[in-house]
Amino acid sequence: MAETQRSWCVVGGGMLGLTLAWRLSEVGQQVTVVEAAPELGGLASAWQLGGITWDRHYHVTLLSDSFLRTLLKEIDLDDEFEWRITQTGFYADGGLFRLNNAIDYLKFPPLNFIDKVRLAGTIMYASRIEDGRSLERVPLTEWLIKLSGKRVFELIWRPLLRAKLGDNYTQASASFIWAVIRRLYAARRSGLKTEMFGFIPGSYDRILKRLSERLTARGVSLELGCPVESIERTGNGVQVRSRLGDQQYDQVVVTLAGPLASKVCVGLKPEEKERLEGIVYQGIVCASLVLKRPLTQYYLTYITDETIPFTAIVEMTALIGTEQLDGRSLIYLPRYVTSEDPYWALSDAEVEEHFMAGLRRMHPGLAPDDILAFRISRVRQVLAISTLNYSDRLPPMITSVPGLHVVNSAHIVNGTLNVNETVGLAESAMPKLLAAAEPSGQSD
């Protein structure tokens, strides 16, 4: 049955907002996307660096990322993926070790035989858990130490957790690591022989341009450089105040981070605002470097040395090759941070000084003239931490204000923040949004 046409405003032009706009326009809705930044994409946006255009933050698609691949198939891009098997490194005890297969694992010097058995057992055990909801009640560190032992936790798990969560890992529940392991085992569960990493030439710059073209062709209005000041119920609709003036819509979907959504949404109940503002977010200070030459053959290098100021090295060229970058190499140095991290107060020059000192400790042969470009991105609210009993405190998507809905990355429950999960969140939210738009449909 065809949906009744209504006017919708999607606040936020990241992949979540754009997927919602795509699905709403697909069922005949009149859609406007309002984005504060001058470009689309949010965390997936691209930028210029040393004469090349690539993603501002590192992204990779897994062969098993079905939600994202379905969307890209609809805009005629899925068949352009290039797939690779990548390699992983581990920087420990001042040395760089390969950790890609069972042989590498058995040879891995920092762990003894018992450690290796306990680590493998932990991963196998977690991969067989079907529902991670019960793990929300268990502190992450407590669960891993119990299964793997303290040595394995200190040598392996803590570096891995810091590479993704920074120091916020101390607040997370065991459901987080379960979700990570489940994603990496998704290929095996789906019958694929191996998991592979993929990219589309041109990366998210190309994806976002194609998606915006197709949205525009469907009649979706894309308003960029347009921060929203307030959203409130007025008369028979919902008013969005921005530089466009006061615009009235039948339905509004806000995809902003919880505290930002709470700030602009007028009329929410105190408990709704409390839930939005109570989400614990981590941020990122991420450096992108263009080099004359590759550093290693590893796509991802985990770091156990906590004196190194970044939490991992992501060498994108190990996945995409130098031909995408005019013969140069692209690496990312992420530092995942809490809201109180001292790096927020540092200038870009100070961050560069610290990061380059750490990188040269790991790679003493890196010469100053090997660095062609260095640029820093800072985002304060990247990932909602899956804290203890997270699902019980989740903000509702369908708010108490008729026609006003909040869907953001905090609603990725027992999952990890990546583009596939983000697209999947949009898909799962759509039935709720459409049902709530009906006259008797105000329920979550």
Image (tube, rainbow, N blue to C red):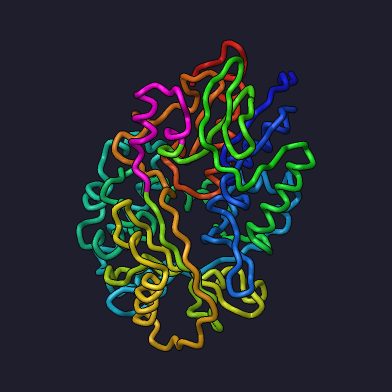
Depth order, front residue of 52/319: 52
Q: Is residue 152 left or right of residue 325?
A: left
Q: What residue is shown at x 56% (from left), y 24% (from top)?
A: 432
Q: What residue is shown at x 48% (from left), y 79% (from top)?
A: 296
Q: Is residue 115 left or right of residue 256?
A: left
Expressed as whole percent of the image width and height from the top left, the position of residue 187 reads 54, 51
Depth order, front residue of 79/211: 211
Q: Is residue 221 left or right of residue 193?
A: right
Q: What residue is shown at x 54% (from left), y 58% (from top)?
A: 59
Which quadrant would the N terminus be assigned to in this image? top right
Seen in the picture, residue 82 relative to 383 is either above or below; the reply is below
| Magenta segment includes 423 | no
Segment tinted magenta in the rendering? 261-281
Expressed as whole percent of the image width and height from the top left, the position of residue 212 reads 71, 47
Disc tally is 0
Depth order, front residue of 439/420: 439
Quadrant for residue 218, please give it.
Answer: top right
Q: Is residue 57 visible?
A: yes
Seen in the picture, residue 161 relative to 17 is either above or below; the reply is below
Quadrant for residue 138, please give it.
Answer: top left
Expressed as whole percent of the image width and height from the top left, the position of residue 427 reads 59, 35
Q: Is residue 103 visible?
A: no
Outermost residue, right side: 217
Q: Is residue 434 left or right of residue 28?
A: left
Quadrant for residue 217, please give it.
Answer: top right
Q: What residue is shown at x 62% (from left), y 52% (from top)?
A: 39
Seen in the picture, residue 223 relative to 378 is either above or below; the reply is above
Expressed as whole percent of the image width and height from the top left, the position of residue 32 reads 67, 35
